[in-house]
Amino acid sequence: MNQAPAQEQAVVVDLTAVIVSIAGDQPCVLVRPRQGRKAVLEALPSGPLELRHRTLEAGLRAWVAAQTGTSLGYVEQLYTFGDQDRAPDHGDGSRVLSIGYLALTRAGKDSAPGETVWRDWYRHFPWEDWRRGQPAVLRDLEKPLRRWVAAAKAGAERTSRKERAGLAFGLDGATWSDERVLDRYELLYEIGIVAEARRGSRAPAASPAEAKLDGLPMAADHRRILATAITRLRAKIKYRPVVFELMPPTFTFLQLQRAVETLAGVRLHKQNFRRLVAQQGLVEETDAIIAGTGGRPARELRFRQEAILERPAPGLRFRPSAA
Amino acid sequence: MNQAPAQEQAVVVDLTAVIVSIAGDQPCVLVRPRQGRKAVLEALPSGPLELRHRTLEAGLRAWVAAQTGTSLGYVEQLYTFGDQDRAPDHGDGSRVLSIGYLALTRAGKDSAPGETVWRDWYRHFPWEDWRRGQPAVLRDLEKPLRRWVAAAKAGAERTSRKERAGLAFGLDGATWSDERVLDRYELLYEIGIVAEARRGSRAPAASPAEAKLDGLPMAADHRRILATAITRLRAKIKYRPVVFELMPPTFTFLQLQRAVETLAGVRLHKQNFRRLVAQQGLVEETDAIIAGTGGRPARELRFRQEAILERPAPGLRFRPSAA
DNA sequence: TGATAAATGCTCAGAGTGAGCATAAGGAAG
DNA sequence: CTTCCTTATGCTCACTCTGAGCATTTATCA
C-alpha cells in the first residue's frame, strides 16, 4: 500500500487564492503577472499543498503570508476544480486539482506585496459592473448570444439555450441577477467568446469584433475561479456581514453603501440601505462626525461585532434599485 | 519536473458521496458498513479519483454507478476536507483529501445496491429532528454545553463560548435554526461529546451519560461530511427546487410538504406551504385525483420543469411554524 | 448669498407572510 | 345511514417588510 499502483499517477494539489480588497470604488483582486504562451497574463496567487500544513486553510495562509506578505483575515473555501481540460498544465502529465479560496482583506491598493498587484476585477468581467447603468459590452454581447441560441436546431435544445441565455444575461424580460457571475462566464466560455475557451485550439480564433467583447483573460482557469469567488461574495454579503472585513474600522453609511455597490456592481437606494443597516443593528455610531463628505457631515460608524452572533443571518439583503 | 521532489509525498484524493433519498418519513443516506478498529461503523461510499475521469463529477458518477448500481441525478460538490488529524488513515502516512459530494436520488429504501444500505440520517444526528417537537436528547445536551461554557475563564472567551453555543443550539432565547447542522456537530466534536472526537485518544472516554447523548458515529470524518451535506441541502431547498429531485413524478401537496419537513426536520403550516408552492408556480395539477389519503382526496401534482428557469430563486422559502 | 451635494428623517402604498377560521369530501365506526 | 375523524382547499386578517420618493438639515464652493 506504500507504493502507488502503476495506474495511479501523480495528483498535484494547488491552493489558489482570490484575495479581495476594495480600493476607492474598485473591487480589487491580488494577481501576479505570469508569462503565458503568447503574452503576459495575470494569475491568481497559488501554491502547492504541502504536507507539513495540518489543514488546508493553514497551508493557504502560510504561503500567502510568505509570498505576498499579506496576512489574511477572512478565508473561505470556494470550490475544488479538477476538470482535466481546463486545469493548469504543469507539463508533466500529472493531474492538477485547484482548491479555490476566497479571502478578504483591508489592504489597500498601495500595498503591492512581492510581485503581486491589485487589479480591478471588472477588467476581467466588464459586463458585471452596472453601477453606471447597463454596461456597453452587454449590448454587444446580445448578438452573439442570440446567434448561439439560433444555432441550435429548433426544439428542446434551442428552448433550453434560449432560457439559459435569458436567465444568465437578463434577456427577454428576465431580470439581471448580480449573483450569476459564474453562469455568465461559463456560458461565454461555452460560446467561445472568452479567450480561455480558445486556448486548446478547440475553437476558432475570435473575430476582432468578438475579441472586444471579452474581458481581460487570466492564466489557466483563474478567471473561472475568480468568477466563482465573485459569485460567492455577492451572494454572501446579503446574508452575512462580510463586507465589514473589507471596511476600515470606522466609516460612514455612504462609504459602506459604496463598498457593497462596488462588490455587487449595482446602485442602491440610499435611504433604504441606511434603514436596512440601521435596523439590523449591524453598526453603531461612534461619537465622531466626519466632515468633508461633500455635503452635510456624516456620523462615523463602526461594525458591531456582537451582531454576528445575534441574528440568524445578519447580512445586507439589499436589492438593486432603479435609480 | 517529472520527478516529484523528495518532500512532496503522496496526496491521495478520495471522492466521497452523500447520496440522499427519502423513504416514507425518513431522510435516507446510502452507507456501507465498514469494519472499524472496535466495531462496525457506517461509511459513506467513497472511491479514489482516477486519472481517466476527465472531471471530478464524472469520476464520482462512474464509481457510484459501478459500486452501488445507482445512477445519480442531481450532484453537487460540497467541500474538500483535508485536515490531517481528521482525515481517514490509509496507514501509509500519505495525505488524504476527501472531496465531498451531495447527490439526490429517488431510489427508495428497498433498493439496497451492492453492500450498501439506506439509513435514516437522524440516527447520526438525533438532535436535528424537531418534527415531533424538541428532541429529547437536546434537553440533555444543554447541561454539557453549559458546562463547557462555564469551563472557560470569565471574559471574552466565555462570552464567545456562550454566544456560540446559544446560537448553534438555540439556547438563551436564540431561535433554533435548521441550517446550523454543521455548526452543532463541530461544537459537539470540540466539546468531546461526539465519539469521533475521542478516537485519537485525544479526549477522555465518554461517561455513560454522555455516550447516550451522541448519535451513531460514522467511519473516518464521514459524519462531518454528512453534516455538511445536510446543512447544504437544508439551505438549498429554500431557494432552489431541489426537493423535486427526491419526489416521485407525481405527488400531492401534503407529500411534498412531508418531504420538505423530513429534510428540514421541522413542521410546517399546511395552508401556507400550499400557498407558497402554488404561487411560486413550481407545480401544476395533473387531471388525476388521489384518494385514500385518509381524508378528502387530493389533487395530483407534478413539478413544472419550466419553473427552474423562470424565477431567480424558485425554492421553498418556508419557515418553521409553531404547530 | 445662493447653488449643490450629502446626510437624515419620515411617509405611504403594496407585496409577502404567519395564523387560523371555515367548508368540502372521503373513510371508518356505530 | 349517520356521526366522527382526517385530510384537502379556500379565504381572511393583522402585521411586517420593502421600494420609492418627499422634505429638511447642514456642509462646501463659486
Image (tube, coloured by chain):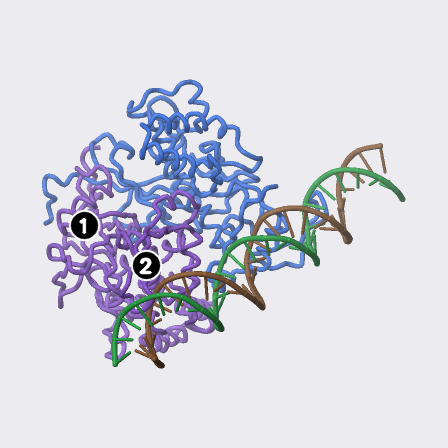
Chain colours: A purple, B blue, C brown, D green
Q: Is residue A322 visible?
A: yes
Type of residue at label 1? Ser
In the rendered image, which quarter is residue B37 located in?
top left
Q: Residue at x 10, y 49 (%)?
A: B1
Type of residue at label 2? Thr
What chain does badge 1 belong to? Answer: A
| Residue B287 relative to residue B24: left or right | right
Residue designated by label 1: A94
Residue designated by label 2: A252
| Residue B56 relative to residue A199: left or right | right
Looking at the rendered structure, the secondary structure element under dot 2 is loop
Mark 1, residues whose alpha carbon is within 10 Å: few (<14), some, or many (≥20)? some
Looking at the rendered structure, the secondary structure element under dot 1 is loop
Q: Position of residue B101 (x, y in %)?
A: 37, 45
In the rendered image, which quarter is residue A191 located in?
bottom left
Q: Which residue is drawn at 70% across and 42% down?
A: B294
Q: Residue furthest top?
A: B208
Q: Respond whether the residues carrying marks 2 and 1 are from the same subunit.
A: yes
Q: Where is residue A199 in the image (x, y as percent from the top left)?
A: 21, 66
Answer above or below: position of B44 versus A36: above
Residue A76 tag number: none
Name the image quarter holding the N terminus of chain A: top left
Nearest the eye: A114 or A83 = A114
